[in-house]
Each structure stands twice: as structure tokens, then as C-alpha cells.
Image: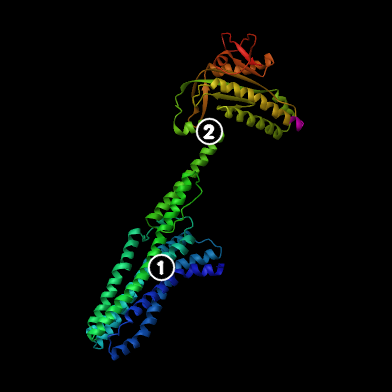
Amino acid sequence: MNERGRRFLLKNAMLIANFTSNLFGYGTVQLITGIIKRPLPAPILNLVDTINPVFSSCAFFVGFTLMLFYERPLRSYLSICFKSGTPTEALALKARRRTLNEPFFMIAMNFALWLSAAIVFSSAAWIAGAESNSIRYLFFLSFHTGLITSITAFFMLEKVLQSVMIPFLFPQGGLSVIPRTIRIRIGTRMTALLLACNIVPLISLVGVLHNLTTSALPAPNMVEQMLASITYNSLIFILAGILITFIVKSNLTRPLQSIVEVLSAVRMGNFDRQVRVTSNDEMGYAGDVINQMTVGLKERDLVKEMFGRYMAPEVRDEILSGRIPLDGELKNVTMLFCDLRDFTPMTEALPPREVIKIINRYFEEMESVIHAHHGLVLQFVGDEIEAVFGAPIPRQNHAQLAINAALEMTHKMAQVNEDLHKRGFEPLRHGIGVHSGDVVAANIGSPNRLSYAMVGDTVILASRLQALNKIHGTEIIVSAATCARVDGPFSFKKLPPTEIKGISRTIDIFTIE
């Protein structure tokens, strides 16, 4: 369908659906009653034929005028949208409210017009001196038509509403928040389905049979007419029931299927799917709630992802789960400090952007090694890395993990330097200090900003060991406490005793050969 046809359909879909419902109701009743001879004398038939064109024209004019008047806010809203304008909030709200209430307005209008026809034609027959059978027949004919028309309009208008109007007017859902609207609830649909498939066919059959029994037909002809009437009524209403049931099934299963698909996507961690909300009933409300839930989950996931960029995912998850005590806990861990050597002169000799690229590349490679060995980078301070093994998630082999990480960091440094050499830069050097012991682990900082940190002599000593690499000309220095915990194919070489600032006792230190 081209754009012009789409715009025409949006403006006139409800009107066309209502007109079709009236044609269907009129045609159905004419088909049902056409199998019996109308029990009307010639003068009354002439009177009906005289009144019918006038009344039908007036009823059509009144109905059409009322529909256009009711739809005026909607048509104004659509015209502005089609011209790429921006309707006012008041107009948009009024157009949406009118659209949601339109099925009920049109059903009431249809029934009122057909009831008026029943009153007008039966009253005219009464004034003309017709018999009571003719008067009842004329009243039943229009009343019956109005009943079938109203039931048909209910389902047709709701179908058009869900498939044509709502997707345009409510692309993001939110039907349930529009004030002063009548909700087409599931119970309302079931009641209408009961009327359409049970009560209306029964009324139709009883009315036709009553007309037959009160007619002047001979008994054999009456039985024949009754059999034909029951057969025609059954076939017509069975087909109508199948059609209406299909419409109701579609209106109910489509939103349910959308809800199931979105919930399945949410279960798989996909929060981009949205329920297509096309009704303001219980399922429409459930769809809106699910859409709000997926937006909230997506925002939470984004916050979680952004949170993880500023701290390790392990710490993030522990903080979000509330498993990290704010008042601190004692943990046995292995601390690793790594510091670049002679990096300050490089920062003075190179453009700032190149310096950032180099140090970020270095941090990226070192952090990947630490994470690969289940370590946690606590912070980057200038050109120094502080990492811990065994916290926040406890690990029995944290010392061995730290040694393995330190060795692989030296290999990664060689790869980084090879790349720097190809780009014409000087190679980098670093020193690594590793020490194991007890620390206090906690969220430390101000109420507005916290960081997961380790506090204690173990942290200080690991930092001091890293600095001793400058004195001993080594790349890795490990404390005796860490060596004692390692059970692996490592060759440790003891270094000469060295005084360590802030430590009153001598400590055995080693390097790895």
C-alpha cells in the first residue's frame, strides 16, 4: 500500500468498519427473514416502502455526521502528522482518547439508530391500523438487525483498532495511562462472544419461529418453513461464529505471543525487544509493565557495564550483591605492584597523545595477564599498577597465581617493546614486587565515592619490594612469605639483605631465575 492509501485508511478505517458492520447486520437479517413470507398486508408494505427511503437517508446522514463529529480531533491530529507537523499535547491526548472509546460510541450509535427504526416502523404500522403480528414483526426486524450490527461492529472495530489505529497512535504502547477511556477487557470480549455465538442466534431463531407460528400459513407449509428457518439460521450463525472466534483468538493470542517472545529474550539477556501493545485490557497493561521492566533492566545492565569499566567485574558483582562488608574484613592475599621505569622522561619527549597510547597499551596488556590468572587490578596510579590475588573472591593458591602472572607480565612486556621498536619508540622497563599476607579489604572513601582497597603492612611491603628492583637490577622481587606458599617449578634466587623503608625487621627477598 502506498503512502496515500495508508493515510486514507488511517483516517477512514473505523468509519469503513462500522459501515461494513451495518451492511453485514442488514444482509444477515434479510437473509434469515427472506426464507419466510413477510406477514404484512399490502397497505402496510406500501407504507414501509414509503417510509424506508426517507428514514434510511436520515439515519445514514445522522450516523455519518455523528461519526465525523466524534472523529474530528483524530482527523485533525492525523492531518497535522501527515504534514510532518507537531500536534499539541492536548490534541494528541484527545485524539487518542476518542480512538480508544470509538468502538463503544459507534456500537451505542448503531443500536440507537436501529432501535429508532424499530420504533418508527412499528409505530407507523400501529397508526395505520396494522395487526399486532405485523407490528411485532416490524419491530423485531429492525431490533434484530441492530443487535447483530452492534455485535459485529464490536469485533470488527476492535480488530481495526488493534491492527491499524493503535500501532500508529501508540507506537510505544502506554494505552493504559490514557485517562477517561473505556477498557475492552478480556471479560468484555468473552461476554460479546457469548452474545454473538449463543444469545443472538437464539433470539433470532425464536423471533423467526414466533413470526411463523403467528402467521396464517397452513400447518404443512409452516413445518417446512420452520425446518428451513432452523437450517438457514444454523448455517449463518455457525459461519459467523467461526469468523468471530477467529477474530477473538487473533486479538488474544497475538499480544500473548509477543509477551512470550519478549520474556524469552529477557531470559537470554536481550533487553532490546518490546511487547507490541495494541489494547488497553489486562494484556495491554501487562505488555506496558513488561516494556517498562525491559527498559529498567537495560538501564541497569548499562549501569553495570559502565560500573565495570571503572572497577573490575568481580568487585562490581561483589558490591552489587552486597557481599563486600563496608566496615572491612580480614583476608589473606598476595599483593602485586608493578611500576614502569624511566617513563617520566618519555612523557616529556613525546606528544601527549602518543604517551597516552603507549601507557594504555601497556596497562591493557598487563591487566589482561592479571585477569587471566584470577587477579584483580585495584587501581592505576600514574604508571603503577596495584593488583591483588585472593580477593574479593578467596583463592587458596593466590601466591602461585601471582607468581605466574608476574612471569607472564615479563613476557608481555617483551611483546610490547617489540611493537614499540617497530614504531620507532624506546623500549619500556618495569619492576614487579610480590608479597603475601593478611590485609584489611573494604570499600574505602567518602560517602559520595568509594573504592575497593587493601590496607595493611602487606600492601606497603609489596610496594617497597617493587621499588627494590632498581637497587638489585632485577625485574621481579618476591618475598619469602610468597615463596613459601608456592608449589611449582620455579627457581628462586635469594637476594642480599636490604633495608626496607618503614619495615623494622629484615625480610628475605628473592628473584626468579
Q: Is residue 290 visible?
A: yes
User: In the image, what residue occupies the spot 73% across and 29% down?
Assistant: 418
Q: First in sequence, mark 2 or 1: give its number.
A: 1
Badge 1 crowding class, 10 Å Cα cut-off, few under 14, some 14 to 19, many 20 or more, is many
The quadrant the N terminus occupies is bottom right
Of the pair 319 and 32, the residue shown nearer to us: 32
Magenta highlight range = 420-424
Q: What residue is disc 2 on?
A: 313
Q: With 27 as the anchor, is 268 left or right in this view?
A: right
Q: Please tell me whether residue 102 is drawn above or below residue 265 in the rendered image.
A: below
Q: Helix, strand, or loop for circle 2?
A: helix
Residue shown at the point (69%, 29%) measured from the top left: 416
Q: Does residue 75 belong to the magenta stretch? A: no
Residue 156, numbered label: 1
- Asked if residue 353 lies left or right of residue 151, the reply is right
| 437 relative to 451, above or below | above
Q: Residue 26: where, in percent of width, then height? A: 37, 77
